[in-house]
Image: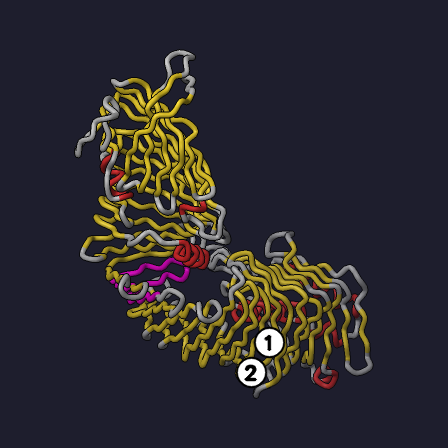
Amino acid sequence: MAARLIRIVVAALLALAILLVGGVGLALLAFNPDAFKSVLIASVQQRYHRRLDLPGTLRLRLFPPFTLQTGPMRLSEADDHTPFAQAADMRLHLNALALLRRRFVVDGIAFDAPRVELRRDAQGHWNFSDLLVAPGSRMPALDIHELSVQGGDVVLRDAARGLDGRLDGVDGRASGIGRGGWHPLSLRGRASLASPDAAASFDLQGQLHADSATGVSLRNLLLRSDGRMLGGAHLLSNLRAQVHWNPGPASGLLIQDLHLRAQGRARDGKPLQIQVDEPMLQWSANKMHVAALHGEALLGAAPRTLHLELRGAAGGGPDDDLQLPELRLQLSRAAPRPLGLALQLGAHLNLPAGELRIDALQAHATWGSAPRAGQWQAQGKGSYSSAKGLQLQLQGEHEGSPLQLALLHDAAGWQLQAKARSLDLGAVPDAAGWQRTRAWLHELPGASLSLQADSLRWGPLHWTQVQAQAHDDASELVLDSLQAKAWGGSLQANGSAALEGPRAALHASLSDVSTSSLLDALVGQAALQGNAKLQADLQWRDPGGAAPQGASGSVGLSMGKGQLLGVDLQDPGRSVTHASSAFHALEARASVAQGSATLDSLELHAASGTWVGSGSVDLATRGLRLRLAPAAPARQPRAAEQLSIRGSASQPSYRWTAEAVAHNPK
């Protein structure tokens, strides 16, 4: 990109220099600066339909070097008063002996603080193209052997390629123009682009061969840059290449032996290394040919280094339908969680429109280690354009079940859409597993996720008809919404989890849920039967992340008709193996803190009366310490049989006790 900007700038400055000295040889021979000034202004207006302003007084210095100094200059666009170029001063170093032979030879042109506006419209026409070739006039012989710029400022707006930026602080010197052979070239400054986003200082060194017959060639080209570019926040790069450009009617560009090496940091601060080798890229008459390409990138520090490798076979064709028959992209990481992705595709590239069509895309992804290693193979297609961004559609199978993915990237960021018949996420992570998962998500770019699954399993949890929306802003994973069928009822949830710390939150509600199905899934055995509505508002702040002992918040339970298994509330003295107690309403609320759920209130309405409860549940061990007692008649304390519930949630034990306690009805 930088080499292309430099080529455009050099061409524009050469065109400007040719314009300003063209057709003025006779006026200089008369050594009359004022006459020369009027002739020059009139010649520019007549031949190029541009307005040239030279508000200062022209001075001719006779001592070597023989110099014509114009002072400030301003040049307009063609048929327009809008400025095209201006400079604080311009000096023409003339060959005095050539003037005596009536030849106008410019040994050098020097610009102080020039400012040039380079623009190209959507049809590919540059605003300086009319300056490259004079429109059929009788001009004296013209040679320009050296061009120098100090403190230059170049604004670039290229609608055909979507480029918008500027070069500032430009200092440069090109020697030997038109003399044949190879001569030194140097150019340095700072480039800032809004589209694509880049800001870097650059230093170009090489050897130049430039004449009207063969065009412009650069050999031993070395371009050093330092700044924000190539997707990095700060990169130091070296680019070596050989370049030939023919600006004539049959214009063409040839780049050979291109080698790019860059290292620095990516936008997220991770170490980044880039290496690209391209033997040849040739463009002429709107056709291109690209030789085999090899590129590599390393992102992140060991052992989490992400390795990306790109290989491309030779391709060619018109620049609006450049065929890239085979591209291979491999992405891999060894630790802490192995990851591999291989893509093979064919593509058609439309350079003028900035569009890419991806055909015959094949993908193979692997992740994790045995025994929970996964893999997925898929086929698909895709496209890229500056308006719509990147779009990939993939369809394959994961563990024998169909899985479709759509990956989108545009100005809003990354979007992943997944549709699956059946997904198994494996076991629910423990505290260490949550930390690894957060670290892994933190490495991924911010994105939004849309998931649809007919069936989803996660440890003991099994949900159907799943629809979920989530987004990751690189600091927090947010569950915007989750809807599913679960345990005979409906689940709705939302929440968030910090990716750089233990903070997390969850709000969930379950409607018409079978308590027996829910308890079977969570603790292995059901002591409560009926349909329930549950609500939970929980937060986690301990190093274990989502571990139960780190939760705090509240939980609510509401049930209609149901049964309490293992005990008979109507006959405390009765001892039967399969006792149960029917009830027609149950309401409970509990506070969660320090690994325990403590009852704030519990009321159970049964044929035997109203019962109230107190106690707690250890969330880590699921151990019960509960007490259930009948509510007293209105404001009258009485001795009552109380039910003590101990043991685990999967196998509770019941024991009746008689204690004199006072209960106030709710």
Mark 2 to mark 1 CA distance (whole Å): 15 Å
Residue 301, given in percent of the width and then of the height, sits at 49, 69
Q: Is residue 318 visible?
A: yes
**Mark 1 Cα-neighbour bin, 10 Å: few <14, some 14–19, many ≥20:** many
Q: Magenta stretch: residue 360 in it?
A: yes
Q: Are marks 2 and 1 in contact (CB under 8 Å)?
A: no
Q: Which residue is mark 2?
A: 209
- Residue at figure coordinates x 29%, y 22% from the top left: 585
Return the residue nearer the eye: 420 or 515.
515
Would residue 567 be found to the left or right of residue 92 on screen? left
**Label 1 SS:** strand
> Which residue is drawn at the image coordinates 33% and 38% (left, top)?
646
Magenta range is: 339-365
- Between 267 and 324, the one lying in front of the other is 267
Question: How would you classify the magenta stretch by its main secondary structure?
Answer: strand
Give the numbered dot on residue 138: none
Crowd around label 2: few <14 · some 14–19 · many ≥20 (10 Å): many
Horizontal placement of 188 versus 239: left or right? right
- Left or right of residue 23, residue 510 in this image: left
**Front-lying residue, 548 or 456:** 548
Q: Position of residue 525 (x, y in %)?
A: 23, 41
Residue 377 horizontal/vertical position (percent): 24, 62
- Dot 1 amino acid type: Leu
Q: Is residue 160 above or below residue 338?
A: above
| Mark 2: amino acid | His
- Which of 512/297 is in front? 512
Is residue 474 among the parts visible in the rendering? no
Q: Nearer the viewer, mark 2 or mark 1?
A: 1
Residue picked out by circle 1: 204
Q: Residue at x 60, y 53 (%)?
A: 79
